[in-house]
Amino acid sequence: MKLYYPLITLFLLSATLVNAQEKKTYKVNTIAFYNVENLFDFEDDPLTFDDDRTPTGKDHWTEEIYNAKLANMAQVISEIGSDVTGTSPVLIGVCETENRRVLEDLVNQEPLVQKDYGIIQFDSPDRRGIDVALLYQKKLFTPTNYKAVPLYIYDDNDTTKRVYTRDQLVVSGMLDGEKIHLIVNHWPSRSGGEARSRPKRIKAAQLNKQIIDSLFSEDPYAKIITMGDFNDDPTSPSVKDVLEAKEDREEVKLKELYNPMEEMYRKGLGTLAWRDGWNLFDQMIVSSELLKKDYSSYRFYKAGIYNKTYLANPKGRYKGYPYRSYADGGFTGGYSDHFPVYLYLIKEADEDSANK
């Protein structure tokens, strides 16, 4: 069965001595990440602290509001990268989802249901019950292995005082016949202050690095994308010093990482705003193999922040900030307090694909 892959045409400098421009056609797929800001159902789960997100809770979270939130999230996801690919992301990591039910309800929304998304999700030990997950278009991506890797953090180095936070989701699979590895993250928050909470994110980064190194030990040329809400910026010690993610792709060597978000951050761009300042906590980081200039297989093309006008607060004190879905105990009609992020993977299309 032949599968449809979106195509784009790029003008690249040819390898000839005359440096003439050559027109080439590429398969292109979007991979994205979205913090969906507390996508909870409206029922009380006695095992988690979800009381606020119930009809009688602080947020007055009714079935009607839940359905409106789902519709908003589905609209955003369906549009990420579509201006280039004509379709929704082939893979999208999400965080702040309460359970599998909300993911099932999400992928069955009108803008997404025809894409037939599969779901990879584990219930995390987070006390609020929020998880990370990966959604994938079944016709384009086939998972071969996946697991949730727990993050063990303890207060005061006391093993009886575990800080329960999100697992890191590791998924390996085949995209158009090529193996790719994805890690979906939601690192510990800055609650209590950035400096005080920093060691927790350092621990998260160390775990992420351990996972990446284990993948490299099996295959030094592994194609890896680690994505998520790191609750740190591209220049923070967790990302810069522990992951050693580099800003300049030309400096990335074998078994190293490139962070395309760092240049955006230095230009003042962000995915969330706080106290009149922008942070770029939501990031997509790729391994060296994805940076090669041989486009006979999938390579990194470019990354971006999906910050369309409708996703920004239209008025008031927080005008221009991400248009969050609830504030002051009520549903705003908005989306999330984070903008999504994405990247494109491209490879040269064969003759059959180009002529479709």
Image: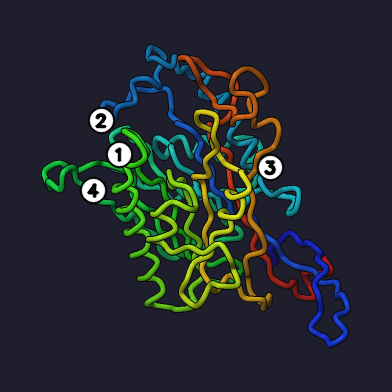
Determine if residue 349 is in view. Answer: yes
The mark found on residue 303 in the picture is: none
Amino acid tagged 3:
Glu
Distance CA(mark 3)–CA(mark 4): 37 Å
**Front-lying residue, 113 or 247:** 247
Rounded to the nearest whole Å, what is the CA distance between mark 4 and mark 1? 12 Å
- What is the x, y in percent for residue 125? 27, 42
The earlier-in-sequence mark between 3 and 2 is: 2
Of marks 4 and 1, the one in the foreground:
4
When the figure is inspected, residue 202 is found, relative to residue 326, above or below; the finding is: below
Q: Name the residue under label 1.
A: 126
Q: Mark 2 points at which residue?
A: 47
> What is the number of callouts on the image?
4
Q: What residue type is labelled 1?
A: Asp
Say if mark 3 contacts mark 2, CB within 8 Å: no
- Residues under labels 4 and 2: Cα distance? 21 Å
In primary-sequence order, the first of circles 3 and 4 is 3
Observer able to see residue 71:
no
Residue at x-position 50% and y-position 28%: 275
Sequence order check, earlier mark of 3 and 1: 3
Left or right of residue 321, residue 63 in this image? left
The residue to which callout 4 is attached is 153
Disc 2 and disc 1: Cα gap in Å?
A: 11 Å
CB-based contact (under 8 Å), mark 4 and mark 2: no
Task: Give the percent coordinates (x, y) of residue 232.
Answer: 44, 46
| SS at badge 4 | strand
Task: Compare residues 237 and 102 and report the one nearer the observer.
Answer: 237
Q: Which of marks 3 and 4 is in front?
A: 4
